[in-house]
Image (cartoon, grey):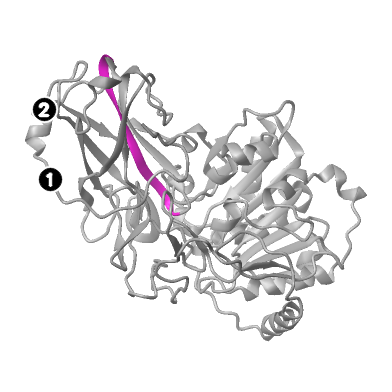
Amino acid sequence: MNMKKIISSTLMASMLLGSSVCSVMALEENSVDKGESKIVAEVFDYGESVTSVVVDLGSVISADELKEDAFEVFAKNEEPEACIGISTGKTYYEGSRNITNMYVNSTSIPDGEADAEGQYVVIELKYGWKEYVDGVLTTVKQSNTCDYDIVMKDGAFSIFESLNVLLDMHYTITSNQNLGNLKQGDQILLTNDDVYRPIAGQFSAGKSNGLTYRLYEPTLGEGERPLIVWFHGSGEGGLSNITHILCNKGGVGFATEEAQEIFGGAYVLAPETPDNWTFAGKDYTEQAIALIQDVIDNNNIDPNRVVIAGCSAGGYMTWQTLLAAPDMFAAAVPICAPGIYTTEDFEAIKDVPIWMVHSKDDTTVDVEYSYANYYLLKELGADVTLTLYDHVIGYDEGSDLIHTYSGHWSWVYALNNDPTNDKGQSLFEWIAEQTLANDEDTVVNPDENEPVVKPDEKDPVEINPSNNVTQQPSGDQPTDVDNNQTVSVPNTGDHLNVVLPVTLLVLSAAIGYVVLRKEKNAKTIRVYKNSFNV
């Protein structure tokens, strides 16, 4: 049997919604002890999906006993009662999950490889972000663990904010054969309490200086380790202390095995704001700095190797935090970040290495913010890089299809370590080498990091149906240009729709564009996209 590893990003394609229903009364009557059974959920570019379930049989069986149709999986996912959408506690998805593979496992942790015998059965499920059926974009909701909706916060209906929320998941696994201690018709009921998260689950929860947070502690390396701080976008704010690391790869992207090998082992801190980083005139900058310092003081962290990064509102928070405490950080990575600053503002941070990432088709935060900030820093002789993309294009997990995200989603590239600078370094490699200890020995050459245009490579995979994007509707939901159908998925974007009224920014961008146009011949990077560094 050809087994695929559960943890890989190329496991299964996305699929159509199921439609079957189950009787609640029957579920209660036939339910049995779940043992170590669990729901397995993994975080991808678009958010978290349930990729498999694990069934504890209660006793060891031979792999030969497992029939192809041994189990059925039914899911009912509801918005929590705190959500104020169409109705309180509305059903997000209810129906069957399509099974792609089953195998016997000797442990309750899926490894993608079948064992000759074991007490557990791993049921792999079809999952993903979207699927094309006869050229029509089909919304896939059955695998999502989060939903983007309107949330009541602090118990007050007068305060509303669009946020990602963790769904109340109810999974029912029905046995179709006598297997181990299970009898035909027995049902195992699983909920949010039974979710296993291979990477996100390694983040511990905490609270400091009025902010909740998740912290990843590295297993690689010895001695004091570096710290990477991730500021989420406005769509991940709230009170759950979990959705801000589930609804996109923010935080989790720095904790993958591949990333940790590059960093040589690094702590990853993901603070959570109770609303937005700039909500209703509030400013959480001082609290964020105090939180970071608290985490440094209470963990084996090298204070000279602290790097801050963030997307959208989190990118703005990256700027604000850096400006407030420039001597605290070895480097900064603002992604699709708004913010208008002056030469006086940037004078304080000109010695801090900065790498910005933005997509030119971003309709939520205009790319001219990044243009203007880049050229302002360059005039000060700063060590600054700006990586720009034409569009945000990526592979659907487990699929050979390519799709276009909202232009605002340039964090997809950053969190997958896609950007490279003119030295050939990837973003993560660059982060790994940053330290305050070397700053005084570093001589910044203002002529470095000149514009480099990276033209398209031909993609070996047929693009279906298009690589184009349309202007995003309210709610920042991705839209496919060919069928004009909006995809309803956990939205990870920031709803800071901004316009640059300042003539100086437009002028700076125009100058930058002229410079960029002069540099047409440069090395290419990854397939299916067009990007360049400035």
Residue at point 51% right, 71% down?
364
* Magenta region, residue range: 46-60
- Which quadrant does the N terminus fall into? top left
Q: Are circles 2 and 1 on residues that touch, CB within 8 Å?
A: no
Q: Secondary structure at mark 2?
A: loop
- Residue 467 versus residue 312: which sits nearer the camera? 467
What residue type is disc 1 on?
A: Val
Res 309 visible: yes
Magenta span dominant secondary structure:
strand
Q: Position of residue 34 (x, y in %)?
A: 25, 23
Residue that carries the numbered disc 2 in the rendered image: 185
What residue did someone put label 1 on? 21
For the residue marked with disc 2, what is the amino acid? Answer: Gly
Q: Which mark is residue 9?
A: none
Q: Residue sitting at 73 percent across and 43 percent down? A: 432
Classify the position of the C terminus by image quarter. Answer: bottom right
Q: Residue furthest top?
A: 59
Residue name at image x 66 percent, y 70 percent:
370
Q: Is residue 256 left or right of residue 87?
A: right
Q: Residue at x 70, y 35 (%)?
A: 264
Q: Earlier in the sequence, mark 2 or mark 1?
A: 1
Residue 413 as seen in the image, left or right of residue 428: left
